[in-house]
Image (cartoon, grey):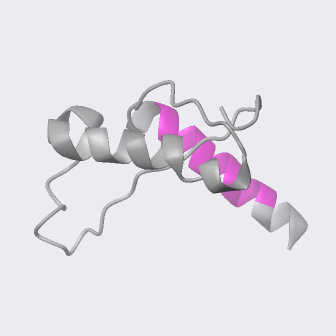
Amino acid sequence: MDSGQADDKIIAVAADDISVSHLRQPQDIPPHLASELRNFFQEYKVLEGKQVQVEGIQGNDVAMPIIQEAIADYLREF
């Protein structure tokens, strides 16, 4: 949630980067990295005076429809 509105974020990894290519689902993310990601998304808009609430990290089953909708929106617009 960003300033009271839903604001989805997608965590992606580079398929050819051996340091992260093994990460496929949220449970594959090491706990410390998951904490860093959560902290980043909670804090990155503080300097703008905005409040962000991270509700949780969800899996590919949630991310893929969001990505597909974003692509469709882009194709309609451009």
Looking at the rendering, which quadrant does residue 21 occupy? bottom left
Q: Is residue 60 at all visible to an observer of this figure?
A: yes
Give the residue at x 30% y 46%: 36
Q: Quadrant of the C terminus?
A: bottom right
Q: Give the range drawn in magenta.
A: 62-73
Residue 66 falls inside the magenta stretch: yes
Q: How many labels does the image show?
A: 0
Instruction: Please tell me whether residue 49 belongs to the stretch shown in magenta.
Output: no
Magenta segment's dominant SS is helix
Q: In this view, does 77 lie above or below 7?
A: below
User: Which residue is pictured at 61% across the width and 48% down the height?
Assistant: 46
Residue ID at (76%, 28%): 4
How far from the left and from the top, in percent, is residue 35? 28, 38
6 lies left or right of 25: right
> What is the quadrant of the N terminus in the image?
top right
* Residue 16 vertical placement versus 4 (above, below): below
